[in-house]
Image (cartoon, grey):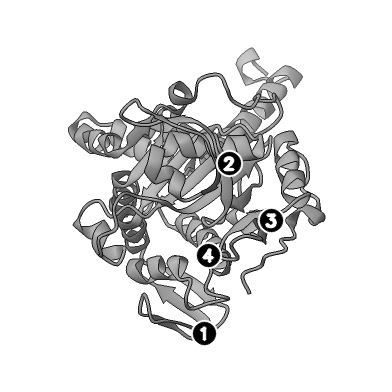
Amino acid sequence: MSHDAMPPGPSASRRAEAANRGSKKEKRRKRKGLKITLSVLLVLLLAAGGTVYWLYSRLDGNITGVDIDKALGDDRPEKLPTSGQNLLVLGSDSRAGAENKELGGGGNVSGARSDTAMVVHIPEGRTKAVAVSIPRDTLVTRPECTKADGSTLPSKERAMFNGVYSLAGPACVVKTVEKMSGVRIDHYMEINFAGFKDLVDAIGGVTIDVPQDIHDKSSGLNLTAGPHKLDGTESLAYVRTRHGIGDGSDLGRIGLQQQFILALLSEVKSQDLLGNPANSFKIANSITRSLTTDSGLASLTSLAEFARSMNGVDPGSMETIMLPVAYDKQDPNRVVAAQPQAGELWKAIRKDVTIPESAKKSPATGG
C-alpha cells in the first residue's frame, strides 16, 4: 500500500471529529442568530446596504432623547453592582398634535401627564422581569426639580404623581421615582397615545381575554367578558378605561393595563420578523415615531443592543405588581404608598432579590 493510500491515523480522526463538532456549533450559532429582536433585525437589514441607509436614518431620527443623567446630576441612589437593570416606562397622555388630541378625547386639556407608569426591573442574568405599576393618583413628595426653561420647581409634599410630568418633564418624574423608591433608574422610555395606537395596528391587533363586561360611557368602549381582538383605538380605550370597571378609580384599570402589556409583548415576540421585513419596518417606524428615551437609548443601535440583552426575557414569565397603596385619609379619591409593604417591595428591587408575597398586597384594591 502506498503512503498516499494509507488510512488516516488517530490524529487525522481527531481533526475530523473536531471539524465536525465545529460545523455543528457553527450551525447552532447561526440558528441562534435568527432569534433576534425587532430592533436587532432592523439594524442588520437596514444598516447593511447603503442603498437603503435612508430607512435606517429615518428610524434613528424618529427617536427623541432626554439626557436624564445630566438633568439629575449626582444626587441619586447608588447603583449596586448586582442590582440588575431598572427601566421607567411612561405612557404619556399628551394632546400634542391632532391625532393625540382626538385619541385623548379632545377637549381643552393642556400639557401632558404620565397616564401610565411602570418600573420594570430586570434582575441580573436577564431571564425574567417584574413590572411595578405606580397609580397615577398616588400622592408623593415631589423633589425640587429644574424645569425645561431653567427655572426651579420647589419641592412639594402631597403632590399628584401624574402631575409631575406636566410641571417639570420626564427628568423630574425619574427623580421623583428614585426619591420615593431608593431605586436607581437606568433607562427611561415614553410613548404617547398616537404611538401606542399605531403600534397595535401595525402588528395587526392584540387578543385580550376580557375579565368582565365593560361598558364605559365616557370612551364608548363596550366589551363582553371573553376573548376579543382589539385594534389600536380599542386597545387605547381598554388600557385607559376607569369608569367601566372596578370602583371607577385609577386602581381598577391597572390590572387591565398590565394584562394588555404582557399580551402586546407576546404578540410582538411571536411576529415573523425575518419572514416579513416590510412589516418589521412598519412596526419599528410606529414605535420610534412616538418614542422618547434617555440619551443612552436614543439611537436605533443602542435600542438594538438593549433589546438583544433582553432577548432571554419571556413575557409569559413577567410578574406584574401594583405598588401597594392605601386610600388617603384626607382625600379618599387619592392614594398613598402603603407601609411597610411598599418599603419592602422597593428594598427587594434595590437588592435584586425575590419580592416577598407580603410586599405585593395592597390595602386599596380599586374594587
| Residue 91 in view of the camera | yes
Secondary structure of residue under mark 4? helix
> In this view, which residue lies farthest toward the front?
330
Q: Quadrant of residue 326?
A: bottom right
| Residue 320 in view of the camera | no
User: Which residue is identified by label 2?
Assistant: 141
- The mark nearer the N terminus, 1 or 4, is 1
Secondary structure of residue under mark 1? loop
- The mark nearer the N terminus, 2 or 1, is 2
**Image check: 200 left or right of 361?**
left
Residue type beneath disc 3: Pro
User: Which residue is identified by label 4?
Assistant: 250
Q: Residues within 10 Å of mark 3 (few under 14, many from 20)?
A: many
Residue 213's disc number: 1
State yes or no: discs 1 and 4 in contact (Cβ < 8 Å).
Answer: no
User: Which residue is identified by label 3?
Assistant: 324
- The mark nearer the N terminus, 4 or 3, is 4
